[in-house]
Amino acid sequence: MSEMLTTLEQTALSEYKYGWVTNIEADEAPPGLSEDIVRFISAKKNEPEWMLEWRLKAFRQWQKMEVPRWSNVSYPDVDFQAIKYYSAPKQKKVLNSLDEVDPELRATFEKLGISLDEQKRLSGVAVDAVIDSVSVATTFKTQLAEMGIIFCSMSEAIQEHPELIKKWLGSVVPVTDNFYSALNSAVFSDGSFCYIPKGVKCPMELSTYFRINAAGTGQFERTLIVAEEGSYVSYLEGCTAPQRDENQLHAAVVEIVALDNAEVKYSTVQNWYPGDKEGKGGIYNFVTKRGICSGINSKISWTQVETGSAVTWKYPSVILKGDNSVGEFYSVAVTNNHQQADTGTKMIHLGKNTKSRIVSKGISAGFSHNSYRGLVKVAPNAVNARNFSQCDSLLLGDKCGAHTFPYIEVKNNTAQVEHEATTSKIGEDQIFYCNQRGLDTETAVALIINGFAKEVMNQLPMEFAVEAQKLLAISLEGSVG
Amino acid sequence: MLSIKNLQARIEEKEILKGINLDIKPGEVHAIMGPNGSGKSTLASVLAGRSDYEVTGGEVEFNGKDLLELSPEDRSREGLFLAFQYPIEIPGVSTTNFIKTAVNEVRKYKGQDPMDAVEFLKKMKEKMKLVEIDQSLLTRSLNEGFSGGEKKRNEIFQMAMLEPSLAILDETDSGLDIDALRIVAEGVNKLRDGNRSFLVITHYQRLLDYIVPDYVHVLYKGKIVKSGGKELALELEEKGYDFIKEELGESVEA
Ligand SMILES: Nc1ncnc2c1ncn2[C@@H]1O[C@H](COP(=O)(O)OP(=O)(O)OP(=O)(O)O)[C@@H](O)[C@H]1O
Ligand SMILES: [Mg+2]
């Protein structure tokens, strides 16, 4: 009781201090971050006390932390007090027909080969009877529930499955892991929760695509995937269609847990707004993604296709704790114009006979910079650890840059760590050869880069791969010739 | 079908083609011989539209069109094929995928639908037999790690798939062993149908034993300095290029 009073008192005091009255009815928090705002967010979401405490703890830690500056990207400092940390998920403005959609956006949809219904859904046109994504989602949900699979929004999970959330949230990415994970933990808006019970092989690709309330949760997304013993799931995040967002800063956290003999495959296509040709605007994407193979023989595999954002800072990692566990990272990162990407992975070998494989393909065009940063760490007890890393860079033009920063820390002499790196250019002679066979330069570039990225693209689920291939080509349009 | 008039071209300020005249009629096979550096590959590249070369004068008509006005890809789509002296490699792209893209680009240009998979496979099989190329080669990355001879054979296979109206073969015979040479030449001969024309660049009379040309031209310092029938190739083989130089009034060191 007294505790509650203190909280109230505090609230009252800080209201005064900040000159802002917490209005639970408000759709939006004013700019800036304070304990009040964290309380407001939590209250808005009707969260239980433990969740609020968790957030507050994170906020207090965050206040003590500093913005990381070690990556190979440069951008103006983000003013964290100028950002709004909560706004109610807005219904997108409903349009009457596709004719009202930005023609540039439509042209991209067309090139991606996205169906008309899907185009409508993505651009917020009221979809008529036949394909209603909501009902599609519900159908899947029932089917999954019968198998004991939980697939819902994080907000829902906090309400419905508190014991699971309490157990696993922050267990892979501790709140204080880094500046952005602490920030995310304090203010995360929503995200997905996915739980695969013991022995269950999820029969379909789980995708945020099918989730009803995926919209408007982009900025501080929080995802948690737990695969119990012997289970399997393939999870798909993102969407190849261009995504615009008014929020410039994105700081998501994704956590994956794989128990004994479990396997999780996580595929992402990231296509946030990259800014214009001069490098104005665009999203800063600072993501923390980490999985732990905590059980024996478990496996976590990250596949990512990164084409969007002005600045990307992202290192999906795997902690190989269980003996014989396997971690994989397959990445294609494309940068064009003035985009900057600093991305890679960390493979932390703790258990015996653990294996990791890294395949990174960086494609740079225009004035962009593309860095691979990888850490392979083998702990003293990780007998017989194996790692193979392949980092290839492809340059289009001579004003862009590719950089590779492989860090290797081996503390056990039975480890075998191999690293290969190449840098190549799309040659004019390659383009001319293709031209001579009737391919225009755009088609030629698309063919060459897809050949370059093939090993990674092959990891994507089929239906996704086709779109992702086209996306690569579109991202590089106009960068050659 | 191809008519070249006074074609001149340069690269980086260096005049290489200094007024080429050449007429090729449907179904004809013309051979071009000439010493290293005389401009043979340059002529092939200029006809195919390589942008490094600047055309400084002359005209080229191809199937009734102004060839020099067309983009390189449109020249290809109009039926001009160049078998490269040095075919390039494209990692991660199989020959099958590459040639399928090429075939369909040409079809698109002609307003046709893409070829369906069954039809395409049938055509592949047929042409593979024609140039005796192994399927395993076609599933590998285009030219990557191919031997010199395999690359050349792959060029001829692509030619067979694309069915051009004019094929320019730039030293397709060099680097081939005797069997491969025969196979490639036979492949070419099978594609001679009375309509399709060939411009064969070679250093060796040997190839012309297999692919019998209607005309032989000698390219020297950017000009065609002598033309004749297939016997000219024999004469060159016997005497070397010195007699041409003599005819041109150039001094020849003993
Ligand atoms: N990029 C370039 N810059 C300057 N000179 C060039 C360039 N490319 C070609 N040349 C020159 O143009 C001339 C003609 O070259 P080309 O390749 O056409 O000769 P070729 O007759 O095909 O010779 P070969 O029999 O050796 O194949 C040569 O002297 C060559 O050095
Ligand atoms: Mg040559």
Image (cartoon, coloured by chain):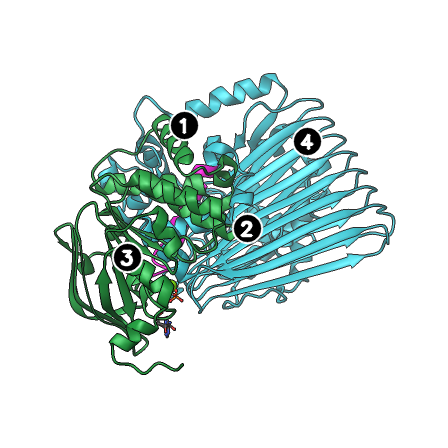
Chain colours: A cyan, B green
Check whether the beta carbons of the residues at disc 1 and disc 3 lie within 8 A of each other. Answer: no
Residue at image mark 3: B231
Residue at image mark 2: B145
Would residue A59 be found to the left or right of residue A408 on screen? left
- Image depth: mark 2 or mark 1 in front: 2
Mark drawn on residue A133: 1
User: Residue A379 colored magenta?
Assistant: no
Q: Amino acid at mark 3?
A: Glu
Quadrant of res B235: bottom left
Residue in the picture at 29% in, 71% down: B220
Q: Residues within 10 Å of mark 4 (few under 14, many from 20)?
A: many
In this view, the residue farthest toward the top is A146
Magenta range:
A465-481
Give the Cα distance between marks 4 and 1: 26 Å
Of all chains, the one bearing label 3 is B
| Callout 1: CB less than 8 Å from ligand 1 | no
Q: Residues within 10 Å of mark 1 (few under 14, many from 20)?
A: some
Would residue A164 be found to the left or right of residue A456 on screen? right
Tell me where residue A303 appears, x and y as whole percent. 57, 43
Q: Residues within 10 Å of mark 2 (few under 14, many from 20)?
A: few
Of all chains, the one bearing label 2 is B
Give the Cα distance between marks 1 and 3: 76 Å
Mark drawn on residue A227: 4
- Indicate the secondary structure of the residue bearing disc 4: strand
Q: Amino acid at mark 4?
A: Ala
Give the Cα distance between marks 3 and 4: 79 Å
